[in-house]
């Protein structure tokens, strides 16, 4: 089973991934926890380039770099783990490209879908939890950070509104998407997420 967590930054994805990892461990279930961009040496290099060194690139280059990293991630890490029967829990995946480079940066969605398809080889999550957080709340959480940690954090409220709206549009397709209220406490959020995840894992 392939599970992904999506949402605007500061919505609590990392916190939830860690808490879910603990729930899986308590249930005696082996899970591969990973994230994008990242998960492989190439993915970590892209992470360093874009998020830490703040390489100034066009939105399309950003989309190519994210998908180059994704291709490595899927081939080297995610597919092998799924083939071994492991559960994969991933902090962001291809929907982040549609939300950020598509809705956020304004690139053409059909083109981005093709790029993502090339990178994933058609691999789709079985379940995607969207942590939905109003942008005002995101601002409060980011304000606690002393300096912007990555270039996306420095974007204005309108950018984050477009990304949030984009996620909600993507989730309208139903199917694998479940929307969770990211204003819940971390404890309530992991309970809500586990209520969705546990029956799928058990079935
Ligand atoms: N990106 C892209 O553009 N295209 C792509 O294809 C991909 C990614 C894959 C990755 O950044 C960036 O790459 C991302 C999109 C772009 N940038 N943005 N925006 P990252 O991995 O470094 O960061 P992030 O994914 O945005 O996550 P984050 O900023 O670390 O936030 P988070 O993981 O969602 O939240 P958190 O770290 O768990 O919590 C944030 C704070 O809120 C922290 O102080 C917590 O203690 C607190 N918190 C957490 N949960 C709660 C609850 N429930 N209530 C109250 N407070 C909470």
Image (spheres, rainbow, N blue to C red):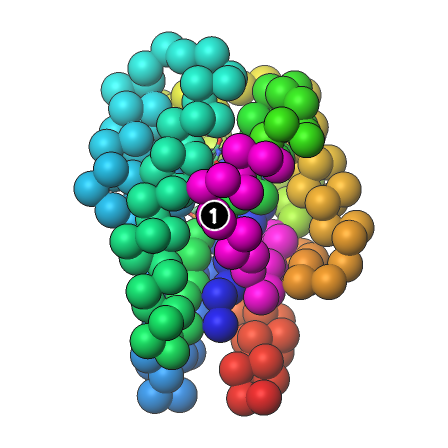
* Residue 90, position as x, y percentages in the image: 43, 57
Vertical side of 182 occupied by 127: above or below = below
* Residue 156, position as x, y percentages in the image: 59, 18
On whether residue 124 falls in the magenta region, the answer is yes
Vertical side of 71 occupied by 163: above or below = above
* Residue 198, position as x, y percentages in the image: 55, 81
Q: Which residues are magenta?
A: 113-131
- Looking at the rendered structure, the number of numbered marks drawn on it comes to 1
On whether residue 200 falls in the magenta region, the answer is no
Which of the four quarters of the rendered structure image does ligand 1 lie in? Answer: top left
Residue 140 seen from this side = no
Q: Quadrant of residue 199?
A: bottom right
Vertical side of 4 occupied by 187: above or below = below
Q: Quadrant of residue 175?
A: bottom right
Determine the residue positioned at 43% across, 63% down.
89
Determine the residue positioned at 49% across, 40% down.
118
Residue 83 seen from this side = yes
Residue furthest out toward the left: 41
Q: Nearer the viewer, residue 87 or 117?
A: 117
**What crowding class fits label 1: few (fewer than 14 Cα within 10 Å), some (14-19), or many (20 or more)?**
many
Q: Nearer the viewer, residue 26 or 185?
A: 26
* Residue 147, position as x, y percentages in the image: 35, 23
Residue tagged 1: 120
Determine the residue positioned at 25% across, 46% down.
40
Q: Secondary structure at mark 1?
A: helix
Quarter in which the C terminus is drawn: bottom right
Q: Nearer the viewer, residue 2 or 160?
A: 2
Determine the residue positioned at 41% across, 33% down.
66
């Amino acid at each position: 089973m392939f599970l992904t967590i999506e949402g605007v930054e500061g919505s609590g994805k990392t916190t939830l991934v860690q808490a879910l990892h603990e729930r899986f461990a308590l249930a005696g279930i082996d899970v591969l926890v990973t994230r994008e961009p990242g998960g492989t040496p190439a993915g970590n290099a892209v992470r360093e380039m874009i998020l830490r060194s703040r390489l100034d690139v066009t939105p399309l280059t950003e989309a190519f770099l994210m998908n180059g990293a994704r291709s490595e991630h899927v081939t080297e890490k995610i597919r092998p783990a799924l083939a071994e029967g492991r559960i994969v829990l991933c902090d962001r995946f291809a929907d982040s490209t549609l939300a950020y480079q598509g809705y956020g940066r304004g690139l053409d969605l059909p083109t981005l879908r093709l790029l993502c398809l090339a990178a994933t080889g058609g691999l789709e999550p079985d379940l995607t939890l969207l942590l939905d957080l109003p942008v005002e709340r995101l601002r409060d959480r980011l304000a606690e950070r002393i300096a912007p940690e990555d270039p996306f954090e420095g974007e204005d409220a309108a950018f984050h509104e477009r990304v949030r709206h984009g996620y909600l549009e993507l989730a309208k397709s139903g199917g694998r998407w479940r929307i969770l209220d990211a204003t819940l406490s971390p404890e309530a959020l992991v309970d809500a997420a586990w209520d969705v995840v546990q029956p799928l894992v058990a079935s």
